[in-house]
C-alpha cells in the first residue's frame, strides 16, 4: 500500500491561523437546535443554514468530509470499485423506465427544464448506474464489477431535522455492483460489509454496528444498515447482547410465546359503556392486556379501502411489515359512520365483509380474550380466535418488544436502543436491471438479467453523527483520522515576546513536519482561546503560556481529557508528532 | 511543501487491468459529434450521454478530473483560499436579494419544492458566498479573505454542444474574495491570475493564455478569461503578437483610422432598384465598402423599441458592446411596415424620430459615403455625417477587425483566433455586497461595503479542452500530470508464458513503486490492444511481446510519438519511473 511517489508534490492546506478562519464561533445554544451535534456545528462555525434542510459548510466541515471521503474512496477501491460520476439532474424518462417516477412520492423533486422536458433531481442513482453500464455489460465475461461515486443528492424530505443529520441536499457515496449469480452478489456483499466496517473504524467510529434492515423503496431482499448508537437517533434497533443479533425494529421478527388456558370459556357479550381503549377494558375486566385482542385500522392510500389488524393487547403494529405484506402504501384509518366500524368496539367477530382482516402471530395459541363486539358499548369476553373466526391465518405484523424473545437465538431477550443510520447495503436483485432491460449473454449464449447490489454512505451525516456520538458540553471531540486539524496551538498572551517566539517556532516545526496545525495567536483571553479550541474539537492541544515557559515547558493535552502532559519546550514538537501517530494508529487494523 | 506524513496510508487506486475497466471503446466516430474531443471521449469510454448537455463520466474521466481538482485546490490554498461548500439547490429568495432572480433568463433553472417554495439550481454562487460570510465579515479586521468550492452547477443552456465543452451540468471551482479597498482587490486579483497560470501549467496546458474580457451578467468591471486556443473554440480572441495584447473579441476596443477626402461632395439621391446590401450598393457605385455607411437594426427585449446602429460598411457590430452601452438586452429587429423603416434603404438622414440612433467610431472622420435614403429604391451618395446629421456622438460598437490596429500598442496589427474559455476571473466590485446588504465597520467605526472578486474554472471543460488541444486521429494525448494513468503496459500475446511472466512482473514492480499503471493482458490482437491504448491516451506505453523478448527487451514509447526506446527487460521498470518523473517535471516551475 504505497503512495504514488511520482504524483506532483501535494501541498496539503495545513497552514492556518485561527484568526483567518472564516466562520463565527459563539457560546449560546441556538434555540432552534434540538440535538447537540446540530447546536455544536452551528456554534462552532461548521455549517450555516440557508433554507429548510439546506446548509452551506465552512472550512472545518469541508476538511472533515474530505477526509471521510478519502477513507471511503480507498476502501471502495480496495474492493475493486471504479469511481465514476452520475448527473444530479436526470431526465424523468430514466425514472419512468424503472417505474420509480410514479412509485416514489414527493421526496423525488420533479421539474421541467427550459424546453419543458420533465427532469428529476437525483436522490439515488440505481437508474443512472444501469444506464451507464447496460451496453458495457452485454457479456458474462465483464462481470462482476462495481462502480461508485461521491456526489450531491437531493431528497425533498418533509421534515428535515438535526442539522446535517437529516437534510434535503447531501453528499453521498453510492456504489452499485453487478453480478451473474446470487452467490456472487452475496460474496461481494460480504466484502462490502467488511469494507464498511473498515470505513467506520478508520473514520474513528468503530462502534458503528450493522443491523438487519427492511429494504423499503430500494427493492430487493437482504439489506443491512450501519448504525451509530445514540439516544437522539431516528431509528430503533433491536439487539440481543447474548447472540449478537441486531436488527432495525422495522425488520426484526417478533416472537411471542402464548400458553392457552386449559378451558376455553364461551363468548359472552358484556355491556361496556364509555370503555374504548385496551387499558380501559382490561381494567374493567381485571384481566392483563395479554388476555385482550386489539384492533388497529388502516386504509390503503390508493383506494381508501380498510385494513383491520388484530394483535394481542400489549403488542403494537409494525407498519413496515404491514406495508410489505400488503405491497402498498397505507395510512391510519379515518373511521366514518358509513364504513360499518364502531371505533373503540372493533373485534374479529361480526366485522363488515368489505374489509381486509389480518391477525398477528401474537394472537396464535390464545383463548379467553376480551375484544370489541362491533356494537356500540359492547365487548366480548371468552374469544378463542381459532374457534370463533373462520379461515384465520397468522402473520407477523408486530413491533418487537423490549425484553421480548430474540428471533435469532430464541433464547435470550431483546433490548431496544436508538441509532443514526450512517450507511446501508442492499442486495437489490434484478429490480432495476429487469425493468430497464439490461441483459447479458451467459457462457452458453443465453440471455440473462444481471443481479445488482447497492451500497450507500451519507458523508455529511456521518460527520454530524460522529459529533453527536463524541462531544461534551463544550464542543465536538473529533477522532484523529477525521479531525479538521491534528493539533491546535494556543499561544496564551501572544503579546509576550517569549510566548510568541516559542509558539511561532512550534508552529513552523510542526508544519514543516507535515502536521495539520491550527494556530491561535490572537491577543484574546485564555478563556476565549480555550472555548474556541473546544468548539473546533481538535484532538491535541498545545498551550504555550508565560506560566508554562517559566518552567521551560509546553502543555500538551487531549481534547477528550484522557491525558495532559507538561513537556520541555525542546521536546514538544517530537512529542506532538508521536501522539498524532498514536492517536491515528488506534483506528488502523 | 511537504506532505502530511501522519495522514493515514493512502491507497491510490493504481491497480487496474484494462480487462476490468468499465466502459466501451470503439473505432467509429459517432455521427452526432461535431468536434474531435467529443468524439474521442465517447469512443474512448470517457463519458456517456444521458440527456441534452448532461453526461455521466466513466472512471478515466473521473481520474483526470480528480487530478485537475487537486491541482486547483493546492493553488487556491497557496493563495490563502479556504475550501467551503455551497448548496446546489438554493432558495429563490437569495437570488431575489441580488436581483438576479429577475435579471437572468432561462439559463437559471427555477422550480418549486414540495412546499411550493420557489428554488433555483446554482449556476454560480456569488449570492451563496455573501450569505455565508455576511455576519462573519462585520469588522475590517477580518479582511481580506477568500473562500472557494469545487461543486456541481447547472446552467440550462439553450444549445449545449461539444461533449463536455458546453454542458448544462458541470463541475466548477468557484472562488470568492472579499476586500476593504479596490487596491487590495487588485493585488489579490493579480495573485489569483498567477495561481491560474500555475494551475494550467501544472495541468499540462501552459499554452492557456489570459485575455481581457467582458464581465457580462457577473457585474463588475475588470475581468479576464483564460483561453485554450483551438479552431473549434466558441470564443474569438484578438491578439497582438508584438505587444502581447490579448482580449476576447467582445471586449476588444476597435480602433479605426479614417482619412477624409479633401472635398466633401454634396448629398445626391440615386435611384437604386433591387439594391439592398452594402456589397450591392458598393458594386453599383464602384466604391470601396469603407466609403459606405451601414445600418444594423435591433430591438430592445423589454419594449421592442428600435435601435439603429450605423457603422462603416466593412465593420460589424459587436453586440456585447451595444448591450453594455444600452444597459439592456436586445435582439435583431423585425422590420414591419408600420415601424417607418425601409429595409435595405436605411440611412442616417431622414430617419423616423421614435428610435435610438447610434454611430460607431468607425464613421468618425469620414465623408463622401453612400448610405440608404430611407426611401424604397433610393440611396444617397456624398454623406458627410458631421455635416448632414445633428448632434452626432461616436461610440465604440464595432467588432475588431483581423489585421486592424492593436488597441494596446496602437502600432501593430491584430490577429484573430479562436479559443475555449477554461477559466475566468472578475473584479466584481460591490454589486452583490451592496444589493445583499453586507457591510463592515472600518477602523474609524464607519460602515462600509466590502468589495468582491470571483474566480472560476470549469473542471470537466478543462479536461475536454486538453483533449481537444492534445489529440491525434487515434485518441487523446494526455499530459502526464492529469493523465488517467501514467503508464500503459501492453502484454502482446499474453498466452506466451514468458510474455505473461515478464509483463506481470513489470506490473507488480511499477505498482509497488507507486506508479499508476493500466495493464492490458487480454488475449486480443496487438491491433486491438494498441488502438485501445491510443484511446486511453496514457503518456507512456510499454510493450512486452515475444519479438521484444527475443532481444531481452521491452519497448517504451511516448503516446505523443516523441520517443521510442528498446530497453533491456531488467532496466525497464527503472527507465519508466525515470520517464514519469521527467514528463511530470516538464510542467513544474
Image (cartoon, coloured by chain):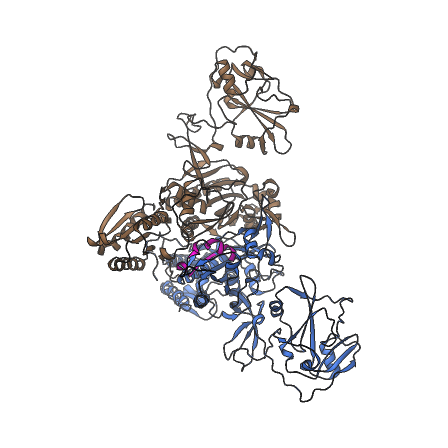
Chain colours: A brown, B blue
Between A509 and B68, the residue placed more toward the observer is: A509
**Dividing the picture into quarters, in which one does residue B550 lie?**
bottom left
Q: In which quarter of the image is the C terminus of chain A?
A: top left
The answer to whether residue A442 is visible is: no
Rendered view: A253 above or below B492:
above
Q: Give the range drawn in magenta.
A: B125-149
Q: Tell me, yes or no, whether the highlighted magenta stretch contains residue B79.
A: no
Between B291 and B196, the residue placed more toward the observer is: B291
Rendered view: B583 above or below A243:
below
Between B433 and B214, the residue placed more toward the observer is: B433
> Residue A490, position in %: x, y?
30, 53
Between A417 and A358, the residue placed more toward the observer is: A417
Q: Tell me, yes or no, whether the highlighted magenta stretch contains residue B136.
A: yes
Is B512 situated left or right of A90 in this image?
left
> Residue A122, position in %: x, y?
55, 48
The answer to whether residue B402 is visible is: yes
Q: Residue furthest left?
A: A551
Amino acid at each position: 500500500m504505497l503512495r504514488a511517489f511520482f504524483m506532483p508534490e501535494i501541498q496539503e492546506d495545513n497552514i492556518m491561523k485561527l484568526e483567518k478562519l472564516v466562520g463565527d464561533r459563539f457560546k449560546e445554544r441556538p434555540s432552534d437546535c434540538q440535538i447537540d451535534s446540530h447546536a455544536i456545528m452551528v456554534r462552532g462555525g461548521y455549517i450555516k443554514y440557508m433554507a429548510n434542510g439546506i446548509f452551506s459548510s465552512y472550512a472545518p466541515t469541508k476538511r472533515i468530509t474530505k477526509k471521510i471521503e478519502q477513507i471511503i474512496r480507498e476502501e471502495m477501491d480496495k474492493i475493486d470499485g471504479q469511481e465514476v460520476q452520475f448527473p444530479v439532474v436526470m431526465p424523468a424518462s430514466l425514472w419512468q423506465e424503472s417505474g420509480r417516477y410514479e412509485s416514489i412520492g414527493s421526496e423525488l423533486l420533479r421539474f421541467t427544464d427550459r424546453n419543458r422536458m420533465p427532469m428529476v433531481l437525483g436522490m439515488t442513482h440505481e437508474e443512472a448506474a444501469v444506464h451507464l453500464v447496460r451496453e458495457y455489460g452485454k457479456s458474462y465475461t465483464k462481470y462482476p464489477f462495481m462502480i461508485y461515486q461521491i456526489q450531491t443528492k437531493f431528497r425533498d424530505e418533509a421534515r428535515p431535522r438535526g442539522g446535517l443529520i437529516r437534510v434535503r441536499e447531501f453528499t453521498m457515496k453510492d456504489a452499485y455492483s453487478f453480478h451473474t449469480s446470487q452467490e456472487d452478489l452475496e460474496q461481494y456483499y460480504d466484502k462490502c460489509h467488511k469494507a464498511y466496517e473498515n470505513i467506520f473504524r478508520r473514520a474513528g467510529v468503530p462502534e458503528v454496528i450493522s443491523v438487519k434492515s427492511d429494504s423499503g423503496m430500494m427493492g430487493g431482499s437482504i439489506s443491512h444498515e450501519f448504525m451509530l448508537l445514540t439516544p437522539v437517533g431516528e431509528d430503533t434497533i433491536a439487539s440481543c447482547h447474548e447472540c449478537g443479533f441486531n436488527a432495525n425494529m422495522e425488520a426484526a421478527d417478533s416472537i411471542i410465546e402464548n400458553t392457552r388456558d386449559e378451558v376455553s370459556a364461551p363468548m359472552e357479550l358484556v355491556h361496556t359503556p364509555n370503555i374504548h381503549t385496551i387499558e380501559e377494558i382490561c381494567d374493567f375486566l381485571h384481566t392483563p392486556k395479554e388476555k385482550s385482542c386489539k384492533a388497529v385500522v388502516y386504509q390503503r392510500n390508493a383506494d381508501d379501502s380498510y385494513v383491520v389488524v388484530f394483535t394481542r393487547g400489549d403488542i403494537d403494529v409494525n407498519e413496515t411489515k404491514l406495508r410489505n405484506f400488503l405491497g402498498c402504501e397505507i395510512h391510519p384509518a379515518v373511521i366514518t359512520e358509513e364504513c360499518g366500524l364502531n371505533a373503540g368496539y372493533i373485534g374479529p367477530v361480526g366485522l363488515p365483509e368489505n374489509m381486509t382482516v389480518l391477525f398477528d402471530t401474537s394472537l396464535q395459541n390464545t383463548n379467553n380474550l376480551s375484544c370489541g363486539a362491533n356494537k356500540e358499548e359492547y365487548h366480548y369476553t371468552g374469544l378463542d380466535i381459532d374457534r370463533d373466526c373462520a379461515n384465520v391465518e397468522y402473520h407477523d405484523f408486530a413491533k418487537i418488544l423490549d425484553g421480548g424473545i430474540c428471533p435469532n437465538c430464541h433464547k435470550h431477550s431483546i433490548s431496544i436502543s436508538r441509532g443514526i443510520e450512517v450507511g446501508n447495503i442492499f442486495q437489490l436483485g434484478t429490480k432495476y436491471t429487469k425493468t430497464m432491460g439490461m441483459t447479458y449473454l451467459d457462457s452458453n449464449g443465453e440471455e440473462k438479467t444481471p443481479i445488482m447490489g447497492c451500497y450507500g454512505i451519507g458523508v455529511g451525516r456521518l460527520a454530524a453523527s460522529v459529533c453527536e456520538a463524541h462531544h461534551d458540553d463544550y464542543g465536538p471531540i473529533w477522532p484523529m483520522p477525521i479531525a479538521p486539524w491534528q493539533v491546535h496551538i494556543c499561544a496564551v498572551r501572544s503579546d509576550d515576546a517569549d510566548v510568541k517566539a516559542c509558539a511561532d517556532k512550534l508552529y513552523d516545526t510542526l508544519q514543516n513536519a507535515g502536521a495539520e496545525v491550527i494556530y491561535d495567536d490572537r491577543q484574546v483571553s485564555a478563556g476565549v482561546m480555550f472555548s474556541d479550541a473546544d468548539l473546533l474539537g481538535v484532538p491535541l492541544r498545545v498551550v504555550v503560556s508565560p506560566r508554562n515557559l517559566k518552567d521551560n515547558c509546553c502543555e500538551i493535552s487531549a481534547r477528550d481529557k484522557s491525558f495532559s502532559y507538561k513537556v520541555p519546550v525542546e521536546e514538544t514538537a517530537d512529542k506532538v508528532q508521536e501522539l498524532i501517530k498514536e492517536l491515528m494508529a488506534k483506528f488502523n487494523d
